[in-house]
Amino acid sequence: MEVVIAPTESIGEIVADDVATLLEAKPHAVIGLATGSSPLRAYDSLADRVERGELSFAEARAFTLDEYVGLPAGHPCSYRSVIHREFVARVDFADGAVTTPDGNAADLDAEAESFDWRIAAAGGVDLQILGIGTHGHIAFNEPGSSLASDTRVKMLTEQTRRDNARFFSDGMDAVPQLCLTQGIATIMRARHILLVATGEGKADAVRALVEGGVSAFRPASILQHHPRVTVVVDPQAASRLVYAEYYSNASERRPSYQT
Ligand code: F6R
């Protein structure tokens, strides 16, 4: 695991640099996209690079992590709408290149199973962008999630619904109780995982992810078992890391990625 501690303003560029490096080497790469506020600076930077003609997603494909169950199609808070608005519509993916789980599928279990098949059929995810919940979820794998889970229906915790109520004009009651989420095993199959966290509110979750024991209680901690994870955090999100100074020195001086 590599921990990069950087000023909040530069985090978007760091993530965008990794995406750009991948696309230069592999224009048809498969990218895993997270919704939520954490990757927004990276999406802004990537959209700017595409606009300047420095980068293209024309041959790339993407899969999103999760979706609420039961929001009407086109609802502004559905993750399909959010990722389209915040990122996909601003870059040059080919039509049909971005796949999102369908939270209105008649058979949600079949949709979940087919989602993992579609990722596999695309060759697997090369670079997965992740955020982290305040209690340590990745995608919507809430505390207690099986560390071997595939994509499935999951019930959201009160805490996640409270955290996400800020996006819904009608408040917490409007936040669905159920979601479809990539499983932890699904996420762990990505070749490189890049997790972004900013702000004091994420400090406990980041501590548990990097320095805690691996536990379903803090699902992100499973990333300690992945061979290539980059955790990009600002000083506030890193504020409870015991080895923060070591991580900073190591990432500044590293010859290349260090596990
Ligand atoms: C989003 C997702 C979630 C968020 C997490 C952090 O697709 O799966 O795990 O990444 O809840 O959300 P923000 O970035 O809004 O703090």
Image: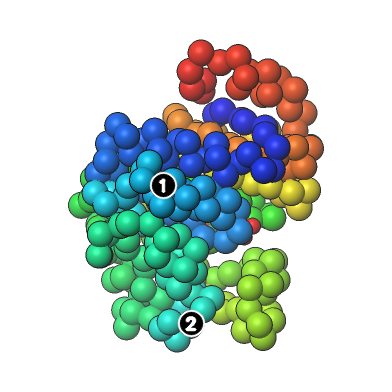
Mark 1 — residue?
A: 52
| Above or below, 203 relative to 152 | above
Q: Residue at x 56, y 79 (%)?
A: 176
Viewer-closest of 27 and 79: 27
* Residue 123 location (% of width, % of height): 23, 45
Q: Residue at x 68, y 55 (%)?
A: 135
Q: How many neighbours does mark 2 have within 10 angstroms: few (below 14), some (14-19), or many (20 or more)?
A: few
Q: What is the secondary structure assignment of the residue under circle 1? A: loop
* Residue 232 location (% of width, % of height): 60, 38
Q: Please count the marks in the image.
A: 2
Distance between mark 1 and mark 2 Cα atoms: 31 Å
Cβ of mark 1 under 8 Å from ligand 1: the answer is no
- The amino acid on which the numbered mark 1 sits, given as a three-letter code, is Arg
* Residue 96 location (% of width, % of height): 25, 65
Q: What is the secondary structure assignment of the residue under circle 2? A: loop
- Determine the image quadrant of residue 23: top left
Spot the residue most to the left.
Answer: 121
* Residue 137 location (% of width, % of height): 59, 54
Residue 183 visible (yes or no): no
Mark drawn on residue 75 = 2
Q: How many neighbours does mark 1 have within 10 angstroms: few (below 14), some (14-19), or many (20 or more)?
A: few
| Above or below, 106 relative to 96 | below
